[in-house]
């Protein structure tokens, strides 16, 4: 007998191999399976209140019971630090330690600039609380100084990993409890936040109400989403992050976020197929900094606040998102607060193909322009598209400068 069978373990609130209603029971199951080289953890129905992230390991399948299994982030607290902590320490002193407890997740932040993403950040676990001192499971690694507005907060992703390959997440709802947590930039957390992880699959997973991104993955290759939903998150619905190669989104929905899918830096050879990107505050899809050779096919992109698909203006030709294709999509009624654009090709972007796509503005729509081509764009191919109800079908700003491009 040479075939291998991996262990299936269950965790539940009233039954199962492991019992509990918080992150500790789920993490115990994940860690147990990791010792055996992998396996499947089935999370039985219930709402599980998480005070820390679930840290995944290689060759783990995390499987819920669909809408009946909800992993919900607990209410957050935040406080300033009352003394400086240097990069080699294992603790910080908080102004108000209430709400911080051993085993709980903690995020330290200190400002490095004016932007939302300009922070030094540490994600850690609290090991002990003594008076106002919060002890951590890892070294601070950075300086967290009062002069730089250093803070501590119970912010963490719901699911996370770094340097972990071959994981499958299925049939789960991830609830970020948005109204009771601070906002955190998607470069540091999200309902899902993974870094340097390859070959992950998400099937029928809902990320909702996170005060940040729904799904954020940074420098990750071959991450696939099938029939996943990112709903009512404060920032990006799906955030294929810097350097991620070959992401795939099939049959997914992004609704009620600030942006539906945001291609970050140098995301290439991706596929967005049969997806619905609707009612996001700004853009359905945003493509920019060195995001090349991606295909958006058979998608419905509608009622987003500003633009259906945006090709961002970057600094110089090299940084623009080239050789991307839009095929067989329906792009309608984008623009809510002001007249919108179906597809906006900005900057020195080149080699963009829009084929067999319907750009539609209905009776009450505000999508005034079907396709806008910026004055510096080159080699834009429009083939077999249908324009209906848009006062301006194609606004070609190149022709206004008498450009032959």
Image (cartoon, rainbow, N blue to C red):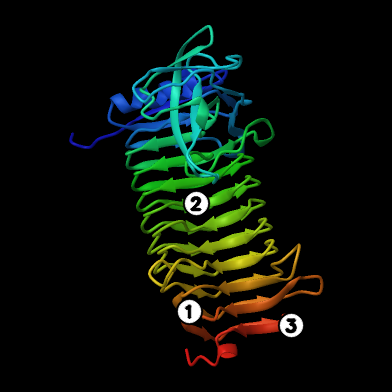
Which of pointers 1 and 2 lies earlier in the amino acid sequence?
Answer: 2
Q: Nearer the viewer, residue 355 or 398?
A: 398
Residue at the spot 61% in from the left edge and 78% down from the top edge: 371
Residue at the spot 60% in from the left edge and 15% down from the top edge: 96
Asked whether the viewer can see residue 68, the reply is: yes
Q: CA distance from mark 1 to mark 2?
A: 23 Å
Which of pointers 3 and 2 lies earlier in the amino acid sequence?
Answer: 2
Find residue 66 and name its label.
none
Find residue 239 and name its label.
2
Q: CA distance from mark 1 to mark 3?
A: 22 Å
Secondary structure of residue under mark 1: strand
Q: Is residue 235 left or right of residue 360?
A: left
Q: Residue furthest left?
A: 2
Q: Nearer the viewer, residue 123 or 277?
A: 123
- Where is the N terminus found, in terms of image quarters? top left
Quadrant of the rendered structure where residue 211 is? top right
Quadrant of the rendered structure where residue 172 is? top right
Q: Is residue 109 left or right of residue 58?
A: right
Secondary structure of residue under mark 3: loop
The residue that mark 1 highlights is 353
- Residue 125 vs 171, above or below: the answer is above
The residue that mark 3 highlights is 391
**Badge 2 local density, few (<14 within 10 Å), some, or many (20+)?**
many
Where is residue 320? Give x, y as percent.
Answer: 44, 68
- Residue 204 vs 402, above or below: the answer is above
């Amino acid at each position: 007998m040479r075939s291998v069978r991996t262990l299936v373990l269950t965790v539940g609130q009233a039954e199962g191999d492991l019992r509990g209603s918080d992150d500790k029971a789920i993490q115990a199951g994940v860690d147990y399976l990791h010792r055996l080289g992998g396996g499947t953890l089935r999370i039985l129905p219930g709402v599980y209140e998480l005070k820390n992230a679930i840290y995944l390991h290689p060759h783990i399948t995390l499987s819920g019971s669909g809408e009946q299994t909800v992993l919900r982030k607990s209410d957050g607290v935040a406080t300033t630090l009352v003394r400086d902590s240097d990069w080699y320490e294992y603790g910080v002193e908080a102004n108000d330690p209430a709400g911080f407890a051993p085993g709980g997740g903690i995020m330290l932040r200190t400002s490095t600039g004016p932007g939302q993403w300009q922070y030094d950040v540490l994600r850690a676990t609290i090991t002990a609380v003594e008076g106002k001192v919060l002890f951590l499971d890892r070294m601070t690694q950075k300086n967290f100084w009062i002069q730089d507005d250093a803070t501590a907060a119970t912010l963490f992703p719901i699911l996370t990993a770094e340097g972990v390959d071959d994981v499958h997440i299925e049939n789960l709802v991830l609830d970020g409890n948005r109204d009771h947590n601070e906002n955190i930039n998607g470069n540091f957390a999200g309902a899902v936040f993974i870094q340097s992880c390859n070959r992950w699959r998400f099937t029928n997973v809902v990320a909702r109400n996170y005060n940040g991104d729904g799904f954020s993955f940074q420098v990750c290759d071959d991450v696939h989403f099938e029939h996943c939903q990112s709903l009512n998150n404060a920032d990006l619905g799906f955030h294929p992050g810097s350097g991620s190669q070959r992401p795939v989104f099939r049959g997914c929905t992004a609704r009620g976020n600030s942006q539906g899918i945001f291609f970050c830096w140098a995301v290439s050879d991706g596929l967005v197929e049969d997806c619905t990107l609707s009612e996001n505050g700004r853009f359905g899809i945003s493509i920019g900094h060195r995001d090349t050779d991606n295909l958006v096919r058979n998608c419905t992109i509608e009622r987003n606040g500003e633009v259906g698909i945006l090709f961002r203006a970057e600094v110089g030709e090299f940084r623009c998102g080239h050789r991307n294709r839009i095929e067989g999509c329906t792009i309608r009624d984008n623009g809510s607060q002001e007249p919108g654009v179906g597809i906006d090709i900005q900057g020195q972007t080149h080699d963009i193909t829009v084929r067999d796509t319907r750009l539609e503005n209905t009776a009450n729509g505000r999508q005034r322009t079907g396709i806008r081509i910026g004055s510096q764009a080159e080699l834009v191919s429009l083939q077999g598209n249908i324009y209906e109800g848009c006062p301006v079908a194609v606004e070609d700003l190149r022709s206004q400068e008498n450009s032959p491009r």
